[in-house]
Image (tube, rainbow, N blue to C red):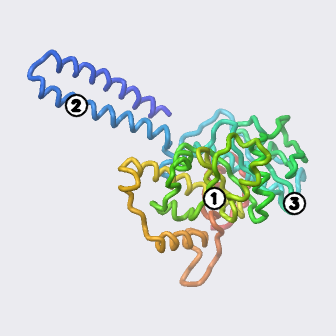
């Protein structure tokens, strides 16, 4: 974040210069000309300060998704730290993928310390899920640290740490996994932009392509920190058959039939909300131009086919890529190139 410190130093210098200019304006005639210069400096300072705030709210890697922010650490734990034969092959594969998801979310700077959760259903086990031990940062998660619990809260495998699981995380994820057998992966995060949109009366608007890719979303009214077991019913009822739900004044929940799909929806939801927050600065709803319902539906249907439109070759299906799978492979290559050893089995490209 050295670039941020450099800019902040520049802003501090500008503020000093700004104060000197005001003093000069008060002491030297003609006042009107000097005031014009001072006002210009005032605008520069305001714009610069707002740019700093934007960079803090939407880090570079999150703003445009074109590159991950610098995240050098002195010790990088390998994601795939499993011992041979420690788990069934399918569970071992999902452990590596879920741990990779935690690392990827952290690299995008969507994590909030040890809080929030992402889970997957254990293959062949309708009532068993994998969840993070509560107390580790996301960059500390590995395939072996993940805890296996059933939907009644019983720990079936504690993972490689002595930490337990978070009650709020368990309440939310067990409710959704229990009601939605079609969802393999559930992601729950709080990012500033999504939390802001979740508090807007208008909800998520289809004002950019990322929002249209996400499609229709559900909403759940805030009822406090999610530790009340009785809230599970309203959570499930509000989510219905949607794969994305905004938790009002809170954050969001995303579910996917695969980890790839869940991350795909999360990625576009966060970008969509960032765009909406920025668009609202232009004058609110009255200043926003929304596409037709037909255009929005077409974008959603195209994205729902997966592969970013590359599943067709010469009008014939050549090789099908699932929703988010092509993008996920690219991110796994990125993690592997960083030496994080995802254990991911890459498809030939």
Picture residue at 54% right of the left edge, 83% below the top? 314
Looking at this view, name the residue that lies furthest to the bottom.
315
Regarding mark 1 in the picture, which secondary structure is present there? strand
Q: Which disc is residue 244 wearing?
A: 1
| In the rendered image, the vertical position of residue 229 relative to residue 328, given as above or below | above
Residue 274 in the image: x percent, y percent? 49, 50
Residue 210 in the image: x percent, y percent? 51, 60
Q: Which disc is residue 120 wearing?
A: none
| Residues at marks 1 and 2, CA–CA distance in whole angstroms | 46 Å
Regarding mark 3 in the picture, which secondary structure is present there? loop
Among the 4 quarters of the image, the one containing residue 226: top right
Which residue does the numbered mark 2 point to in the structure image? 39
Residue 306 in the image: x percent, y percent? 61, 69
Residue 81 can be seen, yes or no? no
Q: For the residues carrying marks 3 and 2, which lies nearer the camera in this image?
A: 2
Among the 4 quarters of the image, the one containing residue 44: top left
The foreground one among 52 and 338 is 52
Among the 4 quarters of the image, the one containing residue 140: top right
Q: Which disc is residue 125 wearing?
A: 3
| In the rendered image, the vertical position of residue 313 relative to residue 308, given as above or below | below
Picture residue at 55% right of the left edge, 40% below the top? 70
Q: Quadrant of the C terminus?
A: bottom right
Q: How would you rate the neighbour count of disc 2 (Cα within 10 Å): few for under 14, some for 14-19, many for 20 or more? A: some
| Residues at marks 3 and 1, CA–CA distance in whole angstroms | 24 Å
Residue 163 in the image: x percent, y percent? 82, 35
């Amino acid at each position: 974040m050295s670039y941020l410190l450099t800019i902040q130093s520049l802003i501090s210098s500008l503020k000093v210069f700004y104060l000197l200019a005001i003093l000069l304006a008060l002491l030297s005639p003609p006042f009107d000309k000097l005031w014009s210069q001072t006002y210009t400096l005032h605008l520069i300072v305001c714009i610069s300060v707002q740019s700093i705030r934007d960079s803090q709210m939407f880090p570079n890697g999150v703003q445009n998704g074109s590159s991950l922010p610098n995240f050098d650490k002195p010790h990088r734990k390998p994601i795939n730290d499993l011992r041979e034969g420690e788990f069934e092959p399918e569970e071992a594969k999902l452990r590596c993928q879920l741990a990779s998801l935690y690392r990827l979310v952290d690299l995008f700077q969507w994590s909030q310390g040890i809080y929030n959760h992402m889970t997957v259903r254990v293959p062949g086990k309708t009532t068993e899920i994998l969840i993070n031990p509560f107390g580790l940062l996301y960059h500390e998660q590995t395939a072996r640290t993940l805890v296996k619990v059933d939907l009644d809260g019983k720990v079936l495998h504690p993972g490689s740490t002595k930490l337990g699981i978070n009650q709020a995380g368990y309440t939310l994820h067990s409710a959704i996994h229990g009601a939605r057998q079609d969802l393999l992966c559930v992601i729950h995060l709080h990012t500033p932009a999504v939390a802001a949109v979740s508090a807007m009366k208008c909800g998520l608007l289809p004002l950019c392509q990322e929002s249209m890719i996400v499609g229709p979303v559900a909403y759940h009214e805030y009822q406090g920190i999610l530790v009340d077991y009785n809230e599970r019913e309203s959570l499930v009822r509000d989510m219905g058959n949607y794969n994305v739900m905004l938790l009002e004044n809170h954050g969001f929940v995303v579910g996917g039939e695969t980890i790839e799909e869940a991350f795909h929806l999360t990625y576009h939801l966060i970008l969509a909300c960032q765009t909406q927050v920025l668009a609202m600065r232009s004058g609110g709803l009255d200043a926003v131009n929304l596409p037709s319902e037909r255009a929005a539906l077409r974008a959603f249907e195209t994205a729902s086919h997966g592969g970013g439109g590359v599943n067709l070759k010469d009008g014939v299906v050549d090789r099908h890529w699932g929703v988010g799978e092509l993008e996920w492979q690219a991110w796994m290559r990125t993690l592997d190139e960083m030496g994080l050893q995802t254990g991911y089995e890459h498809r030939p490209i």
